[in-house]
Amino acid sequence: MPAATGPCPMDPGQMETTLQRLAADLVARVKPEEEVVLLGIRSRGLPLAERLATLLRATTGAQIPVGSLDITLYRDDLTEMVGSPIVRPTEIPFTLKERTVVLVDDVLYTGRTVRAALDALLDHGRPRRVMLLVMADRSGRELPIQADLAGLRVEIPPGHRVAVRVKEIDGEDGVSVEAC
Amino acid sequence: MTSERYVFPHKHLLGIEPLSPRDITALLDQAQAFEEVCERPSIKIVPALRKKLVVNLFFENSTRTRNSFEIAEKRLSAEIINFDADTSSLNKGETLVDTAMNLEAMHPDLIVMRHSAPGAHALLARHMKASIINAGDGSHEHPTQALLDAYTLRKKFGRLEGLRVAIVGDIRNSRVVRSNLWLLTRMGAKVTLVGPPTLVPQEMKATWPGIEINHDFDAVIPDQDAIMMLRAQFERGTGAYIPGQGEYSRFFQLNLARMKRAKPDVVVLHPGPINRGLEITSEVADGPNNLILDQVTNGVPVRMAVLYLLSHPHGEQVP
């Protein structure tokens, strides 16, 4: 897994290679008897989860179910927000009971989104275990949460953001570090 | 997709009239997200209104609307107080404003109110910091009913624009019809009002110029995508406008004979409670074209959407 400091952009080709590696790493991390499902955290986690499922089908032949999770209603800052953020549908058309759930998101930063996602998915059932897969894992955690699999791990100071772009939403793939 | 963040701009839901097509679409889209919560096989509760206090303030009887709101509130994890007019100090001569001031002192976040006076909600909105949701005011508006009707139609047809909808019966005394007229005409549906001349005020065309009025139900039926039957409201004085229930049924009852004239996939709506054998026969009310219980089911996610979108402090406040 490449460790990086400072801006470390990824171009579309590198992102595709990274997804292939993440799919392979995921296969290596689960036991054959585990029933794996992917849950993409909206917005950008969902297309990433769908692409991982496609790659897994191509390499292993396994049909991995993909669901989507909208964590808006579980945010810890929901009551402080001005205006109600629009909630998009959560779609989990399969059971989570006794499954190995792989949460997929674009960036892991404070860990608060993942905390909310854990609350949200536990309302849908009790999985055997939950893993976290992210495209970019950056410094700045505010909760004791870590990624099991990460495409990129970067140390960047506050005041910067890691932007993961996916072609389904942004028109092109890529990762960049930007001042904000 | 993420560049522009839409914020529901209204603090209260006093009626459909102040809502833009975008606001209506936002409410219906939110209801779709909440329908998933209601249909979950596991836990049907989300923490969206945690620590928020909702007061259900009902000055008029209502079973289904109030139950529907209460279920919606519970599914959003709200704290709930039910305040019934007949158990309150109103019987001791307290005015509506006094009641409002007393409630205000307990800092509720949202108030769901049904009241027979059309101006009651606006009055309350002026005196309170809480968001006011109109759960029916006399014969003026019943916005959540119109929203759940629209949600039911949009779910069935995938759109509202261009849909032909006949609203049939006691148009004069119905608050449901007024909210539906605002909503359906704003979203581009083609509405025909049907009923005896005494129950369909011609002046409604002045408020909603795009609508049609027709007193011949049989002539209207074949073109319609949806037929919305209204309850003959004898407790609200329907009887004063028509010669008798038999006469009313002969011309305006939706029965199997009339259904034969309709498109095969026409849908039948009714806000309930239905008078079986009066404005609609049991064969039709329970028949394959009816979406009457779907309306009831859809009422919960629609009301969840309303409660949720009004539950946050707003940047810019529009009444």
Image: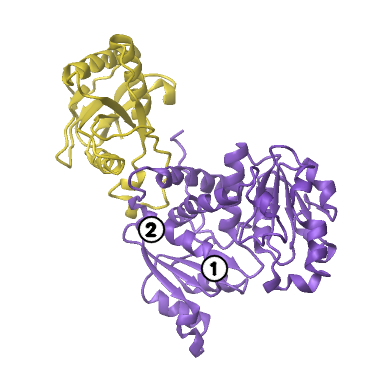
Where is residue A86 drawn, in percent x and y? 44, 44
Q: Nearer the viewer, mark 2 or mark 1?
A: 1
Its colouring scheme is by chain
Q: Residues within 10 Å of mark 1 (few under 14, many from 20)?
A: few
Colour for chain B in the figure: purple
In which chain is the residue bearing label 1?
A: B
Amino acid marked by disc 2 = Lys
For residue A30, which quarter of the picture?
Answer: top left
- Asked whether, in this view, residue B102 is left or right of residue B62, the answer is left
Q: Residues within 10 Å of mark 2 (few under 14, many from 20)?
A: some
Image height check: is A2 above or below B258?
above
Where is residue B87 drawn, in percent x and y? 45, 81
Q: Which residue is mark 1?
A: B62
Mark 2 → mark 1, Cα distance in angstroms: 18 Å
Whether residues under marks 2 and 1 lie with C-beta atoms below 8 angstroms apart, the answer is no
Residue drawn 23% across the image and 35% down it: A127
Amino acid marked by disc 1 = Ser
Count of marks overlaid on the render:
2
Residue drawn 63% across the image and 37% down it: B157
Image height check: is B14 above or below B184?
below
* Of pointers 2 and 1, the one earlier in the residue sequence: 1
For residue B270, which quarter of the picture?
Answer: bottom right
Q: Secondary structure at mark 1?
A: loop
Q: Which residue is mark 2?
A: B74
Q: Nearer the viewer, residue B240 or B248?
A: B248
- Asked whether, in this view, residue A99 is left or right of residue B217, the answer is left
Asked if both marks, 2 and 1, belong to the same chain, the answer given is yes
- Asked whether, in this view, residue B240 is left or right of residue B56, the answer is right
Which chain is in yellow here? A
Where is residue A41 drawn, in percent x and y? 33, 33
Q: Secondary structure at mark 2?
A: helix
Q: Nearer the viewer, residue B34 or A126?
A: A126
